[in-house]
Amino acid sequence: MNDAEALKKIAGEAACEFVKTGMRVGLGTGSTVKYTVLELGRRIKEEGLEIVGVPTSIATQELATEVGIPLVELGSLNGLDIVIDGTDEFDSHFQLIKGGGAALLREKIVAQQSAAMVVVADDRKQVDCLGA
């Protein structure tokens, strides 16, 4: 694993600290969130974490199913407790740009239904000026 992947793994796994048993969790999309999904699956199997997930993409749905995260449709819930997702860019004020990927619409819908959002990114995503 190269340094960039190691940073993504650290960020993705750290986001799991915000997830507690009983939560309804929006599962974002992207190369960093992949590590969040893998860690949540591990915690379900090894630590008995009990959550339900709402994926924002087919790729996330497939990975979450593979690692044993129970999934539900967003419409079957009365909102989400938290969503964990990546970003394309962020600045020193933690303003974000999202939307470089194909899952933007579903990511936005899931984020709007969530009480909290955790954004996972490594330092390569930090910029001085958004969109420059």
Image (cartoon, rainbow, N blue to C red):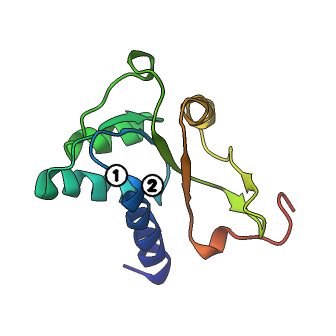
> Where does residue 21 sit, x and y in percent of width and height?
27, 45
Q: Residue at x 48, y 35 (%)?
A: 56
Can see residue 107? Answer: yes
Question: In this figure, which residue is indicated by the disc labeled 2?
Answer: 33
Relative height, residue 72 to residue 67 (above, below): above
Disc 1, SS: helix
Q: CA distance from mark 2 to mark 1?
A: 6 Å
Q: Residue at x 12, y 58 (%)?
A: 46
Disc 2 residue type (three-letter): Val
In the displayed orientation, state which residue is furthest to the bottom. 3
Answer few, some or many: residues within 10 Å of disc 1's Cα (few below 14, many 20 plus, some between 14 and 19). Answer: many
Q: Residue at x 58, y 36 (%)?
A: 111
Disc 2, SS: helix
Which of the 4 image quarters holds residue 2?
bottom left
Relative height, residue 40 to residue 56 (above, below): below
Answer few, some or many: residues within 10 Å of disc 2's Cα (few below 14, many 20 plus, some between 14 and 19). Answer: many
Relative height, residue 97 to residue 92 (above, below): above
Quarter occupied by the C terminus: bottom right
Can see residue 28? Answer: no
Q: Nearer the viewer, residue 108 or 30?
A: 108
Left or right side of 12 for 111: right
Left or right side of 37 for 91: right
Q: Residue at x 37, y 58 (%)?
A: 16
Q: Nearer the viewer, residue 118 or 106?
A: 118
Question: In this figure, which residue is indicated by the disc labeled 1?
Answer: 37
> Where does residue 104 sit, x and y in percent of width and height?
62, 36
